[in-house]
Image (tube, helix red, strand yellow):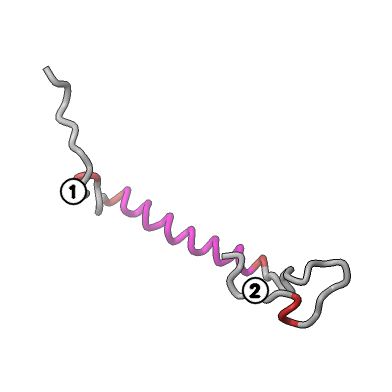
Amino acid sequence: ILPFGVRSQLETGDVSPGSEAGAPARPALMQKVLWTTVVSAIVFGLFYANYVNGWVTVDNVPFVPRFQGPMR
């Protein structure tokens, strides 16, 4: 998320004295925090809804080995 849409000071032509030319000119960190929060809330909601409703379980995954109980 951090590098998306960021232009360096060198690209904008406004390098501040004493800073790295590759430093972001306007990082827009609050916007990135909001986007990350929204995306993570949606992903969490999908996982939680699956947990509550049982849409996809371990039994639906074909490559997971099944435990048959203790061997005698």
Residue 60 drawn above or below residue 23: above
Residue 49: numbered disc: none
Q: Main secondary structure of the magenta part?
A: helix
| Image quadrant where residue 33 sits | bottom right
Quadrant in the picture for the C terminus: top left
Residue 20 magenta-drawn? no
The residue lying at 32 percent from left, 48 percent from top is 51
Query: Residue 6 location in percent, x, y?
Result: 65, 73
**Disc 1, SS:** loop
Residue depicted at 48% across the width and 59% down the height: 41
On screen, residue 53 versus residue 22, left or right, reads left
Q: Which residues are magenta?
A: 31-51
Point out the residue furthest to the bottom here: 13
**Is residue 22 shown above or below 45?**
below
Q: Nearer the viewer, residue 70 or 23?
A: 23
**Which residue does the numbered mark 1 point to in the structure image?**
62
Precedes in sequence: disc 2 or disc 1: 2
**Numbered tag placed on residue 6 in the rendering:** 2
Q: Position of residue 56 (x, y in %)?
A: 25, 52
Contact? badges 2 and 1 (CB < 8 Å)? no
Q: Amino acid at mark 1?
A: Pro
- x, y (%) of residue 47? 37, 53
Taking the image as shown, residue 36 lies to the left or right of residue 13, namely left
Q: Is residue 69 above or below residue 43?
A: above
Disc 2, SS: loop
Circle 2 Cα neighbour tier, 10 Å, few/some/many (<14 / 14–19 / ≥20): some
At 37% from the left and 57% from the top, the residue drawn is 46
Residue at the far right in the pictured view: 17
